[in-house]
Amino acid sequence: MPVVAPETHLLLAIAIPFTGALLIPLFHRQPNLREAVTLTTAAVLAVTVWSLLPQVLAGARPEARLADVMPGLTIAFAVEPLGLLFALVASSLWIVNSIYSIGYMRANQEPRQTSFYVCFAVAIGATMGLAFSKNLFTLFLFYELLTLSTYPLVTHKANDEAIRGGRIYLLLLIGSSMLLLLPAIAATWYIAGTLDFKLGGILPAGLDATLIAGLLALYVFGTGKAAVMPLHFWLPAAMVAPTPVSALLHAVAVVKAGVFTVLKVIVFVFGVDTLASTGAAGWLVWAAGGTVLLASLIALRQDNLKKRLAYSTVSQLSYVVLAAAILTPVSVVGAALHIAAHAVSKITLFFAAGAIYTAAHKTHVSELDGIGWRMPWTMSAFAIGALAMIGLPPTAGFLGKWFMLSGATQTGQWLPVAVIVASTALNAAYFLPIVFRAFFAEPVRAHAAGAAASHDDDHGEAPWPMVLALSLTAAATVLLFLAPDTALSLAKLMLEPVTR
Amino acid sequence: MSKLAEHLPILQVVVPLLGALLCALLRRGTLAWALALAVSWIMPVIAILLLQRVLDGGAISYRLGGWAPPWGIEYRVDLLSAFVLVLVTVVGAAIMPFARRSVAHEIEGDKQAWFYTMYLLCLTGLLGITVTGDAFNIFVFLEISSLSTYVLIAMGKDRRALLAAYQYLIVGTIGATFYVIGVGLLYLVTGSLNIVDIAARLAPAAAETSRPVFAALAFLTVGVSLKLALFPLHVWLPGAYAHAPSVATAFLAGTATKVAVYVLLRLIFSIFGVAIAFDTLPVSEVLLTLSVAAMFIASILAVFETDVKRVLAYSSLGQIGYITLGIGLANVPGLTGGIVHLFNHALMKTALFMSLGAIVYRIGTIKLADLAGIGRQMPLTMAVFVVGGLALVGVPGTAGFVSKWYLAVGAFDRGWWPLVFLILVTSLIAVVYVGRVVEVAWFREPSGFAAGAKDPPLSMLLPMLALAAATIYFGIDTEASAAIARRVAEGLIGGLK
Amino acid sequence: MRYVNEFAQHYNYIVTIFLMVAGLYVVIARGNMIKKLIGLSIFQTSVYLLYIEPAKILGGTAPILDPAYKVYSNPLPHVLILTAIVVGVATLALGLALVVRIDEAYGTIEEDEIFEREGDA
């Protein structure tokens, strides 16, 4: 039985990262202690979030109310299976990512590490708040906080390229959320009189289908973090950030916050049935499907490894949106599963990319010939991540796709099926060559590029914390396939009315 | 004590007035500062007591010298004026602890006492405008505050401060004279100067067709609009804000334009009433058009400025646009948004200008190019700037969001969806002009001026941090801001209470 | 005849308005800072007339209760304008002081020359 009341428990989960953010600067001059604070905070957070799991599986839905900002606008939290799933993934991966960050930041002698860890902790806190938000207003609040707290991380390098990337990042994310998402929320409030999430939707019956479709468009494109084209530019631009940021935030927290918002809005604001009966989400299948394929095509042409991963993320995010747009319970479960599955596998890929950069100072796919033998752990993990992207067993990526496909075939929607099949082929086309090069191509040493090149190739694995981290996430990718019970039951619970 | 409690309204004027006199006699900078500090800290106490009494028992009427209105001058504190009194006095109280070092740094020793004298006179004028219920008396206090403001601006270090002061003097005097002309016309029509009495005598049926009344409204509105820097009557403001001493800028940005808006509210809602202003005359349409123009043009000008003080001055013009937009919407949510933005904008802009004042104190310049890396050298100061900047943008969780939400709801209520969009687009422009400063301050290597700087002493830092904290607090708990603003708005729309 | 009549009746207002517009014109059209202040003073003075004229009643005296007098002028506008004159004098004094300082700082009191020296302002 829980030692603390469920409400306190919930608020703790949100408060812990922020507390960490306050504590970290105190140890500005003692890096070891500072990193210890980060790790401890991450661990305590993960324990807190995991201990919410049994309660939720048992049917409890803890709620907490923080403040009434205005009549009708409250900052309130509620644990709900989908949010919990997202929080579990994000908080668990934060531990792994912190281990990785320590290795990465020290090995690359990055400046201003204290502010890096502070912003990171704030971003995780915002993610927790977003995952547990009870209404649209709270979600929006933490959505913006997440953007703002990750902005300094994107511009961390503080060179011209980073500042330019930061501008695109900030303007696109804040811009879309201010110009589209906020009016959507205000309109929802104006139409429905409430912003609280409710299974089956909160919009009154009998609304015009065009209006619903328009509102949905405001939500989907307003959630720039979901990176549905043409609002995806920020993600490749954000790749100037240090790799741990790309890994946890731009493969997990930030982007998943985007698709989480879309999923949440479809299920809890519009209601799957309303959208299905009015046909107001028909266009979304096209938009998401188009993004999946286009982003994959662009990824094919990217030589910069992180950019290729970024476009792959754009494409994978739209899987989730696509799955939600299919509007069957099975596909929505698939969407939820894919949030978790893509998180663990994409973070593995980024970890590997960062490890390659740290050990070999290489950033481009074309430079990776034969690197697999120098960095066997890293590249094996990369291979597992790649398999998950393609959606092959025995990796987690298979699960989500399976549910999406069965949802689409059950209702006879052949467009999504075609998209998924085509994109699987494309995914294979841009990931398998990397693995192939790494293990089977001749190392670049052969064509004499001079002393510098040969010195560059004189490397082994990255520092051990990084290797440990990427091995853990690779293992998790496989484990999620072998033992998907927790994720699956949470995803299914999401669609069941609360029975206490 | 109860004897004294009856005289609270007049104390709002008398205390700073006597303080100003004493300051002038003291002649020593530090002593004058101590006195100004004491006065500034007493004032919010009185104002909050007044607000409390108004909230409990309705409007307070105070007869100056015991003469009954409408013959004698009546001081009248209703919810709106109490709200503005609290706003002005709180800004004053927050600035004074900050002032000592900043003023000592920017103004020569023998003139410091005069600075505090003028500050207290300005406070007297602003509070007097708010507290009085007599239209001509408003003019007198308006000129007290204006004359002292000209002096405050002229005390700036740069010689351009003199020019800015002169230009403001010309424009300000024209504005005040327009106001007197309007009052004169009203007096000719009604034979009264008491605001409540004028409103009662302007019987709607007769007044709606009366040309002198329309002319009076026009003169009054234009006069006050000059004072509150409504676009396109704003040209004096950027220069004045940019060249005045930091403390004066922070104080004026937080209070002077706000009090002018108060007068506008009084005119439209308490004197002429909704029927004349909005039904017969197109005040609403004019205000909306000018407000949107202000929001866009000023924000865009702010983007291209290289002097950060000017950036904020232009931003102020845009933010005033939000306030007048709320008035122009002429419904309860819109007006609530406008009134609460008076308060919220005062908090955030004062905090912002104080952070600039701290930078001037440390490095002596405020040009954007000189601020490279200042964020790393003065992290707390720039943190205040960032918080204020976020509030300008209207990020949820800051006070700015509350204002914009109400304005958006007001626009929805009128069925003007595109207006919501325009409000949000200007917020986005704010991202750009705040972002420019943030980029330079945090993501450039410290060099030149900024290299050796560090955060200012606590006496300057604490007031700034307090205001920044308040900016966030009033974004989360709006019981004391938006809830009161809403009651004020309901009272104004419903007519005089 | 009617127009002459109208003119005669509103004669005082016409003078007031003429002074008002003339003053304002000088403020706007002149670049010399002293002349601007003169214009401003004329503008303000016109307002004094606006208040005083309607309050003066021909043959009326100051409102001192005395059985000998029946017709009084309205004292209130006179008092108000006394205040306004004080304000006007203060403004003029301050304006002139500023012009002296500007002359010291720039060596001229012509606005266009000053703007030339500053570039912006």
Image (cartoon, coloured by chain):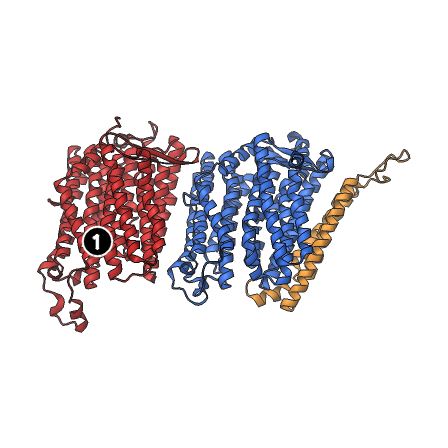
Chain colours: A red, B blue, C orange
Q: Which residue occupies the extreme bottom position in the image? A: A450
Q: Where residue A276 sits: x, y (%)?
A: 25, 32
Q: Please state which amino acid type lies under the numbered disc 1.
A: Phe
Is A127 displayed left or right of B423 in the figure? left
Chain containing mark 1: A
Q: Where residue A148 sits: x, y (%)?
A: 36, 49
Q: Which of A173 and B112 is in front in this view?
A: B112
Is A408 displayed left or right of B423 in the figure? left
Q: Quadrant of the N terminus of chain B?
A: top right
Name above or below for residue A496 compared with residue C51: above
Q: Where residue A23 sits: x, y (%)?
A: 35, 50
Q: Which residue is denoted by mark 1 in the rendering?
A: A350
Name above or below for residue A307 compared with residue B331: below
**Location of residue B81 by image quarter:** top right
**Location of residue C80 by image quarter:** top right
Q: Which residue occupies the extreme right position in the image? A: C68
Is B282 displayed left or right of A271 in the figure? right
Name above or below for residue B77 compared with residue B101: above
Let me know if residue B281 appears in the view. Answer: no
Secondary structure under tag 1 reads helix
Q: In which quarter of the image is the C terminus of chain B?
A: top right
Q: Where residue A17 sits: x, y (%)?
A: 32, 46
How many numbered badges does the structure rendering display?
1
**Residue occupying image coordinates x 13% and y 52%:** A383
Let me know if residue B478 appears in the view. Answer: yes
Q: Nearer the viewer, residue A20 or B486?
A: A20
